[in-house]
Image (cartoon, coloured by chain):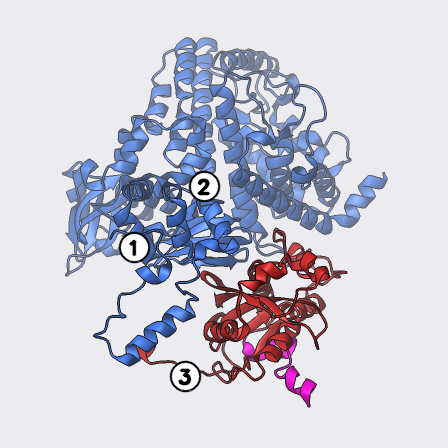
Chain colours: A blue, B red
Amino acid sequence: MKVLSSAPLSCVRPTLTSAALTPNIRLACREFALRLGVESSHSLSQSVVTETVVAFLKNVPPFQFLSTSELARLAGHVALEFFPKDTVILSAGHSAQDTLYVVHKGGVKLTLRSQVGKQLVLDMRSEGEIFGLLSLMGRDLTRLDVTAIEDTLCYSIPGKEMQRLISSHAEVANYLLRTSVTRYMDRSLQELRTQTGLMGDTERLLYSLAVKDVLAAPALLCAEDTTIREAAQMLASSKATCVFVVDASGTAVGIVTDRDFAEKVAAQALPLELKVTEIMSRPVAAVEGSERVFHALLAMVSGNIHHVLVTQQGVPAGVLTAHDLMVLQGKSPLNVVRFVEAQPNVQDLASAQNRISGLLPLLLREGAKASHVTRVVAEVNDRVTAKILQFAEAKLGPAPVPYCWLVLGSEGRREQTFKTDQDNALIYSDGGDEPAAREYFTQLAMFAQEALVACGYPLCPGNYMASNLRWRQPLRVWLSYFHDRITEADLHGTEDALIMFDMRPVAGDFSLFEKLAAQRREWLKQKDAGTFKSVLACISVAHKPPLGFFRNFVLERSGEHKNQLDLKLFGTGPIVNAVRVFALDAGSEHTNTLDRLAALPGWPDRDPALLQDLEDAFEFLTLLRIECQLRQVREGQPLSNYVAPEILTNLQRSLLREAFRASVRAQAVLEEAFRTAIWAQMGR
Amino acid sequence: MFRWLKPELPQAEGAFSKSTPLDALRYVVLDTEMTSLDRRSNRLLSIGAIAMDGSRIKVGEQFYRVVNPGVPVPAESVVIHRLRSQDVEGGEPCAKALQDLCRFIQDAVLVGHFVSLDLKLLRKEMDGTGHELNNLAVDTARVHQWILRHQRYSDDLPMQLEKLDLTALATHYGLEVHDAHHALDDAFLTARVWQVMMHKAQAQGIRNLGDLLRIAGAPRFPGRWFHS
C-alpha cells in the first residue's frame, strides 16, 4: 500500500466513512477518530511530543530508512510503555503478541526455558534495539520469554503498522528479514562472543542450514513392547547410538541410548527380557527438520543431551547427534582427546597442545556455556598431564611405590580458562625404600615440570608445584599438613589452604588421595575445626567486589594495569572463596565452584535466590574472563585477568554490576554465619 | 463483536467501576496554561492532553489547543508559558476548544499535576457553554505523597522531596526533564511520571480505580462549592 506520508492522519484512516455506511456507523467512525485525537486541522508533526519520538526513531534501524514525515506518521501509532525491572514483557507459550518493541531506555533479556526448566539467556536487547519481531511475523516465538533486566521504557508499534512498512519499504523488509535470521538466533553470540572476531564460515552454516540438510542418519524406531535384548540387537546391527521408542500413533515417547545399556542394563544387571520402556529416558528432545541447526544445538546444550530427534511434520524422521554438529564445526573435543593420546613424545605433545589452543574459541562459537568450556579445558589439561607422566615413567622406569598426581587451585576446580600456571602436587605411598622413592619422585617431578613448560604451562610463581619438596611428600606428611592446617589454624599461612582444599587427583593411584580426603573429612567434622573455618571465612571476605566500580572506578591505581579491573581477584575470586567455605562446612567433597553450589544442602532463608544468582554471576564472570583473554590473544598481548572498563559494552557493565552484587550478598551471609569467630580472629 | 460500532453515549460518571484495575482504565493526562493563578480573574490560554491506555502512553492520541482568551496576556505570565497576546490571537474560541477537549476526553479518568487547578479553570470556562467536565480525576502530586509515605525503606529513593513541582518529581522518578511550560509537553511529562508511579502504586497495593481515588482523587465538583 502506497502511503501519502505527508497527509494528515485522518486521510489515511479507515475508508469506512463512505456514504454507503449507515449514519450510526459514520458517527462511530467519527467518534473513533476523535478518540484518537485526530483532526485534520492539526497535523501531528507539529507536536513537540511527536518530534521527540521521531528524533529517537531516526537513529534506530530499520526506522532510519524512513523520511521524517513518514516517521511522524508512524509516531501517531506508537505507544510509550514502561516495564519495571523483572517484568515479563512477553511470555513463552503465550500467543504471539502483535507488537514490535523498540527499547528506549533500559534493557531486556530473551530467554529460553529448557525442558528441565533451566533458563538459557539467548540474547539481550538494549537501547535502540528491537524485540517482539518474530511473533510479529508469525514465527515461532512461543518458546521465548522477554524480561526487563532493569526499569525499561519501550516504544511499541502495532503489528499492522509494521506490516504496512514492510510491504511499502524494501529496506525495512530486508533489514527485518536479515535480522530475524541472524540477529535473533545469534545476538548473544555476536554481542558476547563474536565481538572477539570469531565469526567464521562454520557459524554461518550453523545458523543458516536447516536441520534436515545436515541430517546424518535415519532414526531407529521400536515399539513400546520391544524388549531390551531386541533393542540392543537393533543398535548393534546398525551404526546408530540410540533408538527411539514410539507409541501406537507413531509419536516418539522415549529414547534409549548406548549409555543406557551400560548404565542401566549392565550396571544394574537388569534382565534383558524387560521392555525398553523400563530404561528409556523421556521426554524426547525433538526439532522439526525445517528448523535451523542452531535450535538443535540449543536443545543439546540446554538439556545436556547428545541426541535430538528430527521430525518431519511431527513424524520421527532422523536423529541428529552432538557428534554430527561437531563434525559440522570441523573439530570435536573428542578428537582432541584422542589426538593427545596419540602423541609419541613430549615435543609432539607440545605442538599438539599448541593446536588445541584453538579449541576454546571453537567451543565458545558452539554456544557452550563458559563452565562447559572450562571443563573441557580441564579435561584436555588432565590428559596432557597424564600423558607426560606416561612419558616420565617410560624414561625413569616404573615407580617404586604407588603415587598420585594432584592438581590444585583453579586447575583443581576445573576452572582454568586459557593455559595458566602449573599448580600441582604429588603424594606417594608410605613405606618401602623411602630414599629411593624420594629420589625417583624428584626425577619424575622435574621431568613433568619441564615437559609442562614445553607444552605451554608456565611455572607457578608461588611455587605450588610437585617439583617443590614441600608439595612432594609421602601420605603421612600430607596428613600432617592437613591436620596442622585444620587444628592449629591462624590467619597466617592459611592461604595455602585455599589451594590445598581445591585439590583433585589426575593420574596415578587415586586411592592415596581418597585416604587423604577421608581423613580430612573427619577432621573438618570435629569441633576444633570451627576456628579453621572461621579463619577461612575471614580470608574469603577480604577482597570486596568493587560495587562502586561504575561510579568511582575502583581499579588498579598504578603499574602495568593502571585503571583496569582484576576479574579474578575481584570477580570470580570472591565467589570461589565464599562458596568454598560453605562447601567445606557442609562436608562437600567437590572442588568445582558450580558443583559445590549445586551440592549445598540449602541456603539461609535470608536470601533464597542467592544460589541461583551466584551460579549466574560465576558463569558470566568466567565468560567475561575468557573473552578478555581471547581478545588479548588476538591482539598479541600477554594473558592476564585484567580488563579495561571502557572496552565493555553497557550490557556487560550492568551484568558485571549484578555479578558483583551477588558476591557481596554471599560475603554478607558468610560474615553473618562466622561473625563472632571472624572478630575473634581479627582481634588476635 | 460489533460493540465498537455502537455510538458511545457520554458517560462521564460510572463509565469505570471502582473495581476496574488500573491497567484497564483509559486516562487522559492534561495540563493547561493560564493567564494567572488568580482563580477569579484567570483565563485559559492553552490545553495539552495525551491519552493513556492503562500504562501505555498513546503518543498518537494527543490534544493541543491554543485558546484566544479575549483579554491581554499579562506580561508576568508570558515569561512562564511564552504565549504572547499575538500568539493567542489566532487561537480558537474557548468554547470550541473545550468542546473538542470533552470529545477527546470522553469517559477517561483525568490525570494531572495539581489537577484541581486545571479543573477549576476548565470548569469556570465551561460555565454556560453547555459542556461539563465531571470526570473522575487523579492528582499526581497526591499520588506521589502517598507513595512516599508508604514506600519501603529498601527503595533507594530519598524519603522526602522538598519541592513538589513537576520537574522535581520527574527528576525524582529518574526521567530526563526538558524545557517545561508547554501544555502538551507538560502533559506528556506528567503522563510519564504517572506511568512510573502507577507501577509503584500497584506494587504497594493500589489495584483499582477505587483505591486510586481514595489516595489521590481530586474533588469532583470544586466549582460548585465555589459558587454555592
Q: Are marks 1 and 3 on the same chain?
A: no
C-beta proximity under 8 Å, tags 1 and 3: no
Where disc 1 sits, the SS reads loop
The amino acid type, in three-letter code, at marker 2 is Asn
C-beta proximity under 8 Å, tags 2 and 3: no
C-beta proximity under 8 Å, tags 2 and 1: no
Circle 3 packing at 10 Å, graded few (<14), some (14-19), many (20+), is few
Magenta-drawn segment: B207-228
Looking at the image, is mark 1 or mark 3 nearer the viewer? 3
The amino acid type, in three-letter code, at marker 3 is Leu
What residue does disc 3 label? B9
> Is B208 or B111 nearer to us in this picture?
B111
What residue does disc 2 label? A59
Q: Quadrant of the C terminus of chain B?
A: bottom right
Chain hosting mark 1: A
Task: Judge whether residue B144 can be spotted in this image.
Answer: yes
Chain hosting mark 3: B
Magenta segment main secondary structure: helix
Spatial distance from mark 2 to mark 1, Cα to Cα?
46 Å
What residue does disc 1 label? A283
